[in-house]
Image (spheres, rainbow, N blue to C red):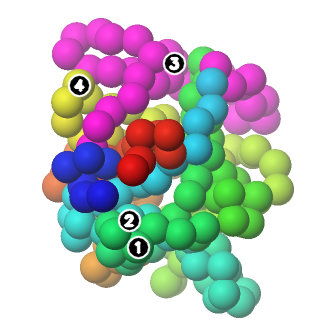
Amino acid sequence: MNLARISRTIGMTVAAGAIALTAVPAASAATAAAPIGCFNGWIGAWANNRLVSAELDWEGAGYGALLARTATAKEGDWEQFEICLGSKCDTIRSLASSRYVSVEVDYTGSQKSMLRARATAVGPWEKLDVVCRTNSYCTIKSLENNKYVSVTDSTVLRATSTSIVSDAKFGIEHQDQMD
């Protein structure tokens, strides 16, 4: 497997040359939309050609940190996610921990805006907008802080980018498309 294969895109509707996986932002931060559909798959970072992994051996505030650190030929349980596409928001859940990915919006220091697989339910910090462009890259955006997820500090995923920079491009692939 390689990132060229991971960048195969998925989508629900086509509009203006982009495949939009969500129709509109969440109307209420307190209400999660029912998913349109979910699939299991992998997320690959274009920034360093690595798969995203949930760090489940870390303790405390680092537990579940999402890092783009795994060689693309070495995917395992920690690299598998359930991606759910909804009409108002999307979610990502680690299959290894059964926890939703949160954006640490109110954290400071080294955990500021870090993505972590730690939530047992969907709240404002777990609401995302996943968009894949036709035959190209995908972006992940936090609906809580309105920032794109990018790879920072070589491997750490954080929602801190105000625009789609090269470090904010990902490939997403269905598990059933893998060899």
Q: Position of residue 129 (x, y in %)?
A: 48, 35
Visible residue check, residue 53:
yes
Q: Position of residue 78 (x, y in %)?
A: 58, 70
Counting residues from the start of the chain, the first of labels 1 and 3 encountered is 3
Counting residues from the start of the chain, the first of labels 2 and 3 encountered is 3
Say which of marks 1 and 2 sits in front: 1
Label annotation for residue 110: none
Counting residues from the start of the chain, the first of labels 4 and 2 encountered is 2
Task: Give the residues in magenta.
Answer: 7-36
Looking at the rendered structure, the kind of residue marked 1 is Lys
> Marks 1 and 2: CB-CB under 8 Å?
yes
State the CA–CA distance, disc 2 to disc 3: 28 Å
Judged from the image, the secondary structure of the residue bearing numbered disc 4 is loop
Quadrant of residue 70 in the image?
bottom left
The residue wearing badge 4 is 134
Which residue corresponds to the image point at 26% horizontal and 29% vertical from the top-left? 133
Number of numbered tags placed on the structure image = 4
The residue wearing badge 2 is 51
State the CA–CA distance, disc 1 to disc 3: 35 Å
Counting residues from the start of the chain, the first of labels 3 and 4 encountered is 3
Judged from the image, the secondary structure of the residue bearing numbered disc 2 is strand
**Residue 7 in the figure: left or right of residue 25:** left
State the CA–CA distance, disc 3 to disc 4: 19 Å
Counting residues from the start of the chain, the first of labels 1 and 2 encountered is 2
Say which of marks 1 and 3 sits in front: 1
Q: Position of residue 179 (x, y in %)?
A: 39, 50
The residue wearing badge 1 is 74
Looking at the rendered structure, the kind of residue marked 3 is Val
Looking at the rendered structure, the kind of residue marked 4 is Thr
